[in-house]
Image (tube, rainbow, N blue to C red):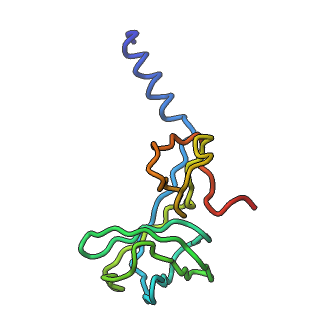
Amino acid sequence: MTSSELLTFCENASAVTRDYVANPRVTYRTVSGVNGPLVILDHVKFPKYAEIVTLTLPDGTVRSGQVLEVSGSKAIVQVFEGTSGIDAKYTTCEFSGDILRTPVSEDMLGRIFNGSGKAIDNGPPVMAEDYLDIMGQA
């Protein structure tokens, strides 16, 4: 075995033995109802409170939402951009497995932000030092 082949073998072996965690995402077409800014999803596996959901409408429009309530395999999602055009039969939903996080930094002190953590005071952009749960700590 040449040194080039040995190096290639070592790189491949290293890649195979890393501790990768794969969280497969499942896409659902189980919208059972729409009421105001809320979408009711049935037959979803392990939805989590405050989890971020991506909804893709039949025309390709993508909207975001957050799980407000969980009851067994049912989840109620608040859609941030509104629910007009959501078709119960053809809208797909994907759970991200993550919660809404906001960037934080000492540069934020004295600044003005909206509820999503975006600066609204016409100041320079804030470079995040960390990302924290937007709901706060328990």
Instruction: Name the spot of residue 112 as percent of width and height, x first.
Output: 55, 55
Q: Residue at x 55, y 49 (%)?
A: 103
Viewer-nearest residue: 110 or 35? 110
Q: Is residue 122 left or right of residue 104?
A: left
State whether residue 125 is above or below residue 6: below
Q: Could you tell me how many numbered marks the image carries?
A: 0
Report the residue at 45% width, 24% height from top: 11
State the residue lying farthest toward the right: 138
Where residue 40 appears, as percent x and y from the top left, is: 49, 84
Q: Is residue 45 above or below residue 23?
A: below
Quadrant where the C terminus lies?
Answer: bottom right
Where residue 90 appears, as percent x and y from the top left, is: 31, 80
The image shows residue 101, relative to residue 4, as above or below, that is below
Q: Quadrant of the N terminus?
A: top left
Q: Please name whichever residue, 14 or 31, is drawn nearer the observer in this view of the structure.
A: 31
The front one of 95 and 79 is: 79
Q: Residue furthest left?
A: 59
Q: Quadrant of residue 9?
A: top left
Residue placed at 56% from the left, 66% from the top?
51
Q: Position of residue 46 (x, y in %)?
A: 59, 71
Where residue 107 sits, quadrant-wise, is top right
Q: Residue at x 38, y 81 (%)?
A: 83
